Amino acid sequence: MIRVESLSKKYGGRTVVDDVTFTARPGRVTGFLGPNGAGKSTSMRMMVGLTRPHAGQATIHGRTFADLPNPGREVGVMLDASAQHAGRTGREILTLAQQTMGLPAGRVPEMVHRVGLTEAEAEQRVGSYSLGMRQRLGVAVALIGAPSVLILDEPANGLDPAGIRWMRDLLRGFADDGGTVLLSSHLLHEVDVVADDIVMIGRGRIVSEGSKAELLKGAGAVVRSRDTDALERALRDSGLVTSRSSDGALHTDAEPTVVGLVAREAGLALTELRTADGGLEEMFLALTADTQREGKAA
Ligand SMILES: Nc1ncnc2c1ncn2[C@@H]1O[C@H](COP(=O)(O)OP(=O)(O)OP(=O)(O)O)[C@@H](O)[C@H]1O
């Protein structure tokens, strides 16, 4: 369990993390979502004692990172995969971690295998690794101490689609085994597909937080058919409130199962039917637009 309480950080008088409070729970993947510059990395660095907060604190299983006797055995951290020593081989980096944490030597080949690096790749210098390979090595270092908590900053960066899938399955499996996962991303979809809980941050402040189920509850459905008019009529005749977006999608306040039944009754084939995202995407786009404007002005 990670508990973040009123964390704040200023740089040069500017508040970049502002009173951030949330909990990442065991058995769940928590997505820390926000556009570039929102304060995700700074928050994570404070959680693992690399940056000193101006106020607030973060605890892992009730203790600050600095108070953990053998931190790597409790929390696996990957903040910047490209920061690994370029002159060392993957195996050397893992061996260093294994020795520092007092683990059996067998953990090294085990981790090489676990993250899908080949034996030959493990012997190469990290300087020759692709970003995706560095991410895999970073995950191996994070997992080597068999921690129960993972803190990963943008773990999908640089991975190809198969790698992204691999990462997702690994994090899901880790949480399903009772582990706590906190991962950051600037991509809504990436968080949406893997996270159970979402903490959305913009300009250093938490703007939305909850389980995905809660955030999407009562969000209604988005539905499309080739015959939009007929679908709209059928839905309205069934007493459902609808609105139409400029691209021809209909938004209803009813859940997808209800909408599917109405369409079937009306003999209409659907080309899309999904739960609406409850404004998450709109909120996220607004945050992103703000940041981009800020970037342009700077
Ligand atoms: N050491 C530092 N000195 C001064 N400003 C900093 C420092 N580190 C971060 N910042 C600023 O703090 C703000 C938040 O940065 P942070 O890296 O935490 O955001 P982020 O959400 O992780 O985004 P990104 O994915 O782009 O890293 C940014 O405006 C950044 O420029």
Image (spheres, rainbow, N blue to C red):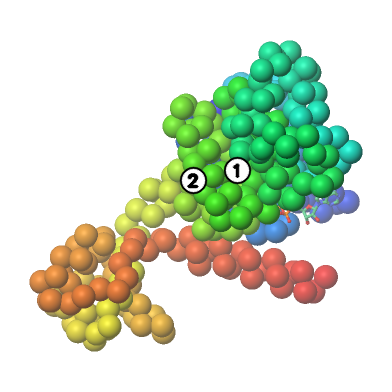
Mark 1 residue type: Leu
**12 versus 95 height, above or below:** below
Q: Are marks 1 and 2 in contact (CB under 8 Å)?
A: yes
Per the image, the residue denoted by label 2 is: 195
Q: Indicate the quadrant containing the N terminus: top left, top right, bottom left or bottom right.
A: top right
Indicate the position of residue 290 as horizontal and vertical percent values.
66, 68
**258 versus 169 height, above or below:** below
Q: Is residue 258 left or right of residue 184?
A: left
Mark pair 1, 2: CA separation? 9 Å
Front residue (pair 135, 262)? 135
Residue depicted at 30% across the width and 67% down the height:
273
Indicate the position of residue 189 as horizontal and vertical percent values.
51, 58
Indicate the position of residue 142 as horizontal and vertical percent values.
67, 31
Per the image, the residue denoted by label 1 is: 183
Q: Secondary structure at mark 1?
A: strand
Q: How many marks?
A: 2
Residue depicted at 69% across the width and 13% down the height:
104
Q: Is residue 240 left or right of residue 88?
A: left
Q: Can residue 34 be seen in this snapshot?
A: no
Q: Which label's residue is closer to the chain start, 1 or 2?
A: 1
Determine whether the beta carbon of the residue marked 2 sits less than 8 angstroms from the nearest atom of ligand 1: no
Front residue (pair 98, 83)? 98
Mark 2 residue type: Ala
Q: Can residue 268 be seen in this snapshot?
A: yes
Q: Secondary structure at mark 2?
A: loop
- Rendering quarter of residue 99: top right
Residue depicted at 70% across the width and 58% down the height:
36
Front residue (pair 18, 196)? 196
